[in-house]
Image: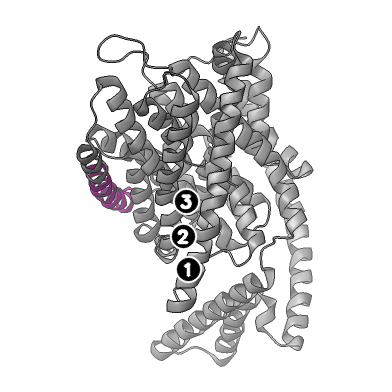
Amino acid sequence: MDQLALLFVVLLGALISVPVGDRFGLPAPVLMTLLGIALALPGFVPNVSIPPELILPALLPPLLYAAVRRTSWRQFTANKRPIFLLAVALVFVTTLCVAVVAHTIVPGLSVAAAVALGALIAPPDPVAATAVAGQLGLPRRLVSILEGEGLFNDVTAIVLYHVAIAAAVSGEFSVWRAGLDLVLSAVVAVAVGVALGWSANKLLSLLGDATLQIGLTLLVPFASYVLAEELHGSGVLSVLVTALFLAEYAVDADDVVSRLAGHTVWDVVDTLVTGVAFGLVGLELHNAVRTAAGRWGELLGWAAVVVAVVVLVRLLWLLPATWLTKRLHALRDYDEDIPLSWRETVVMWWSGMRGVASVALALAIPLRTDSGAPFPDRDEIVFIAFGVIMATLVLQGLTLPWLVRRLGVRADTEREKEFETQLAARAAKAAKRRLREIESVEELPDDLSEQMNRRAFEIGLRISPRIGDEERREAQENRVRRLKRVRRIQGEMLSAARHEVLAARSEPGADPEIVDRVLRHLDVRSLR
């Protein structure tokens, strides 16, 4: 099997893991990791030869962009306190605790190398957390916090990692220089993210065509990441800022085609890249296996201790952090999402899975220092990192669905339905308001005005039947049943028309371009 065949297998697995995971209640990223492990074990499967420095730029930008599309800047600002406690403070605390323990138990491990180990395993993976949380029907407030933590913790961890690696390679370290690098990295990233977001927004309006607009959105995350890194900023933070800018300002309510097509394209990209990313996590297992040759007991012992530190630190941090956030919320009435019970806190604790970023950072550790000497204990760091990744991703990922069911943590569906009803009512009122504006400048016949008023109300009623009284709901249900019957019959008629047009494609003298144009017309008609 060559590299291309292996890539095809991983991409196919990314697609198959979604329905399999839904069928058995397991997270697709975890299944892809297990597939990667299974592929890494046979001797005929080649080792993955992706340069470590390309893993983050190739995988993180589209994954982060896809994740940000599901949220908003308002959501981040509303949850800034819990996100700060998890994404910034907890990363620092985890890095410190892991560094102290690793420096103590691993003979000869330098402080800088220990900090690098702590930094690369400190951030929970944003893709794993959101993918798992999204499938389990968790309360929206927990998903919001996990998304915010996952999207921002990489920024802190990667900067810490680079500072520690630079200190280990050069043998020099300055606290002030490290702090200045952190601030400058964030400033540059925000500036690049805003500038690129503004530029992309202008280009989107100029392009006009949905195909070109979607193509641009596929390029923007990579451009934002690479440009920020070239200017010594945080590529991760730059992608987040760019994506949030476009989510806020590049939305045209009437651009239906681009919105529907864009969602479809990005869902496909998200599924495939997520599958490749977590398949790569499993495939890279051979690096850890090669390192452990003849030293399994010692290395497994060190990895187990670090895993325990990572898991316990998250729990011991979450308990007071959640309490503090609750107190601030109660005293000052902040509009933010917080865990409301110890059960939700436990679920947040067990959701701290490591993944793609940790793998990429572990593999990107230099082979040698500036003096030409081997990087101190590089093999041991890589093995411990993979031990933490496998233990948290596979063990926690496989047991999280059981834990959620056991604790009974579920989304408040009644609250979600109430919000949906409010939006439906607002949509119907907006439609009626616009109708009155039209009637003020155009003279509409009474029957047409009455019909349009009924249509305006039905806009909201179709979204949420709860906004109408019992008689209207019953009438709407009857209309829906009739509409379904009409659409079924119309669908069969359009299917016959499509088959006839497709048959004409193989007839002598038929122009395929004209056939495809007629077929697209029928396809668009079928969506109405």
Q: Which mark is residue 336?
A: 1
Nearest-to-viewer mark from 2 and 3: 2
Nearest-to-viewer mark from 1 and 2: 2
Query: Does any portion of residue 507 appear in the rendered image?
Result: no
Q: Residue 269 appears at what percent x and percent y? A: 52, 38
Which residue is found at the position 60% from the left and 79% from the top? 455
Which residue is found at the position 27% from the left and 49% from the top? 190
Q: Give the range drawn in magenta.
A: 184-208
Do the residues bearing badges 1 and 2 touch, measured as CB atoms within 8 Å?
Answer: yes
SS under mark 3: helix
Residue denoted by label 2: 82
Prevalent SS, magenta region: helix
**How many numbered circles are shown?**
3
- What amino acid is labelled 2 in the image? Pro
Estimate the spatial distance between the alpha carbons at disc 1 and disc 2, rounded to whole Å: 8 Å
SS under mark 2: helix
Q: Residue 228 appears at what percent x and percent y? A: 27, 38
Q: Which mark is residue 392?
A: none
Q: Residue 149 carries which label?
A: 3
Earlier sequence position, callout 1 versus callout 2: 2
The answer to which of 455 and 22 lies nearer the viewer is 22
Estimate the spatial distance between the alpha carbons at disc 2 and disc 3, rounded to whole Å: 8 Å
State the colouring used for the structure image.
one colour
Do the residues bearing badges 3 and 1 touch, measured as CB atoms within 8 Å?
Answer: no
Estimate the spatial distance between the alpha carbons at disc 3 and disc 1, rounded to whole Å: 14 Å
Q: Residue 405 appears at what percent x and percent y? A: 76, 54
The answer to which of 222 and 410 lies nearer the viewer is 410
The answer to which of 372 and 282 lies nearer the viewer is 372
